[in-house]
Amino acid sequence: MAFFGLLGGEAAASDAAIEAAALRSDRFRQEREGDWKRLEAIVTRMEAGRWRRLSDEDVLALPVLYRTVASSLSVARETSLDSATLAYLEALVQRAWFLVYGPRTTLAGWLARFLGGEWSRAVRAIWPELLVAFAVMAAGTLVGWLLVSSDPDWYYALVPGQFQDARVPGATREVLQGTLFGSAQDDGLSMFAAYLFSHNAGVAIMCFALGFAFGVPPLLLLVQNTATLGAMVWLYHDKGLATDFIGWLSIHGTTELLAILLAGAAGLHVGRSMAFPGTRGVMQAVAEAGQRAAVVMAGVVLMLVVAGMLEGFGRQLVDDTTGRYIIGYSMLAIWLAYFFAFRRTPSGSEAA
Amino acid sequence: MSVGAASMTAKIDRRRVMITPEGIALPVMVGSRGSRLGALLLDLLFIVVLMISTTLLLAYLGSGVDDLRSEALAKGDKAVARASEFLVVLWIAVMFLFRHAYFLFFELGPRGTTPGKRLTGLRIAARDGGRLTTEMVLARNLLRDIELFLPVAMIVTNSGADNMGAAGVAATVWFLVFGLFPFFNRDRLRAGDLVAGTWVVEAPRRKLEAVLSTTPTAASGHSAATGAQYRFGEAELAVYGEFELQTLERVLRENRPEALVAVHTAICRKIGWEPGAGDERAFLEAYYTQLRARLESGMRLGQRKADKHG
């Protein structure tokens, strides 16, 4: 232990000397530690979900403190080798970053912005896919019609069993007419509407989500659903009931088919960005398309609520063809006007 | 040891750097597949519990309404019939919301994470380091429907039969394709994350540790126990770099006597001092502080020394 005595005779260091001898990076930490601790306290309370107990002052201070601590981190990385402090700052900045750059809108605020222009803008942004989806749906209807008119046996292949109760080739005009009118008993309508909504929303979400497979499955779904439609139109047309059938369908169908068209187009949009990402990376292209399509889809679910109500209540309560046409096509006009004529950019929009 | 080494490699493998909008590079740890599966199972459990309890509650209310209904029908009162219908509508709506809105509600909420993820220490974040938007959360959760709910529903309906039909097999393949998706990309993205531009990362939590270099011994190099004064020369400090400094910091923080002795001996040997005994901590604190001071002043001049070889 000889070497211990080398400089041992010096006087014990005073507090001032300690302060002077302390590393520059430690003085840096001591000066800023208060801010760090305050940010940590705010973040901890926010993470625990205790927003109510935060003062307005703290909420306002969050972004400022976040930037202060982030700059502390930048400086510390260049000047300090205290790895515990660096790790603490990195974790703290990340926690605050989650809060500062988290989804900050309330549901109501988002809804207002969504209805106030973002939805219609997202719909307009996928117009090429809308055209494709529309063409596919028209083609599907035509194919269904042509197949069944060439050979009525196709009807059983195209129309799912639940619609084959009385609505089969060879049924009399009266039977078919009975399926369109006169079910004006109002028991269980809201139940029916809720069921239809939940079912159709499932189909539409699937239509969108399958776009993931390069957009092929949405096309198939669109063709399959509209071929059913074409086959049924043929059946009623055959008995001279086409106008009434279209009225029966239109009251909710304009909304519902438009919603399915949007869902299919949204799916195609994701699929297209995957197959043809353009100059961006595939991942980035898919993420951008996915977010745009998600906005469209939120609207689709909303439209299906409306369609379910029209189908469950409107169709049963409005029992004449003219009324059904008026309701169905005014709904269509309203949707189209909203999507294509309503061009307001909402303020404070999140998406670029 | 090999297990420890494997988990260490897995940890390094999950490290990513994310650039915040301020241009600061933050290290993030991508959530492990195991904890994500755990989070999902927890959330599903919560959903099922919520669904069952709501169903039971509504059924209880419904049975009450039914009793009233038979009385009311005798009197020709239609309002009660409507009440039970309303309960069914409510049930359908609530089931729809539990299935589709549970994840949305929590991921859009102030905590930005579902209860299951919170319990397993996970969060979702935008992959590009920017703001996590409502659109992203919507997109990643819409995809969840085809990744999980749809194929599972198909498997369940098809497994009722003795032999699983083609649809059952297709659904199983489908389920596996999406279920194994996180195994086929670096960032453990599921299909929904890919489409939404998000990823799932570990939520960090760290306490601010005490400063080692400001204790009286560390700052002055003066040992209170032995009265020795440690002052190291340029040549004695020049042998080590930042890596050794961090190791020394860890040893001091863990403060295990045998590790302190071992490191003390190693340093003394390296710098040509005679290792003593009984005052290791004071020696190491002083050495740590002076080594750090030297390396940090080098840093300010743009000279960094990564380790003893550098």
Image (cartoon, rainbow, N blue to C red):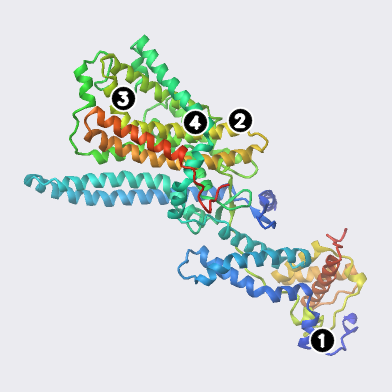
On what subunit does the disc labeled 4 rest? A
Label 1 vs label 3: CA separation?
101 Å
Q: Secondary structure at mark 3?
A: helix
Q: Are marks 3 and 2 on the same chain?
A: yes
Provide the residue designation for mark 2: A275
Mark 2 and mark 1: span between their CA atoms? Answer: 74 Å
Q: Amino acid at mark 4?
A: Leu
Foreground mark, 1 or 4? 4
Amino acid residing under circle 2: Ala
On the question of residue B141 being in view, the answer is no
Of the numbered discs in the image, which one, if any, rests on residue B227? 1
Residue B253 tag number: none
A157 vs B230, left or right, is left
Three-letter code for the amino acid on which mark 1 is drawn? Gly
| Mark closest to the chain's N terminus, 3 or 2 | 3
Residue A80, image x and y in percent? 77, 67
Q: Tell me whether marks 3 and 4 sit on the same chain.
A: yes
C-alpha distance separating marks 4 and 2: 17 Å
Amino acid bearing label 3: Ile
Q: Position of residue B56 (x, y in %)?
A: 28, 50
Q: Earlier in the sequence, mark 3 or mark 4?
A: 4
Residue B305 percent coordinates (x, y)? 85, 61
Which one is nearer the viewer's eye here, A78 or B244? A78
CB under 8 Å between discs 4 and 2:
no
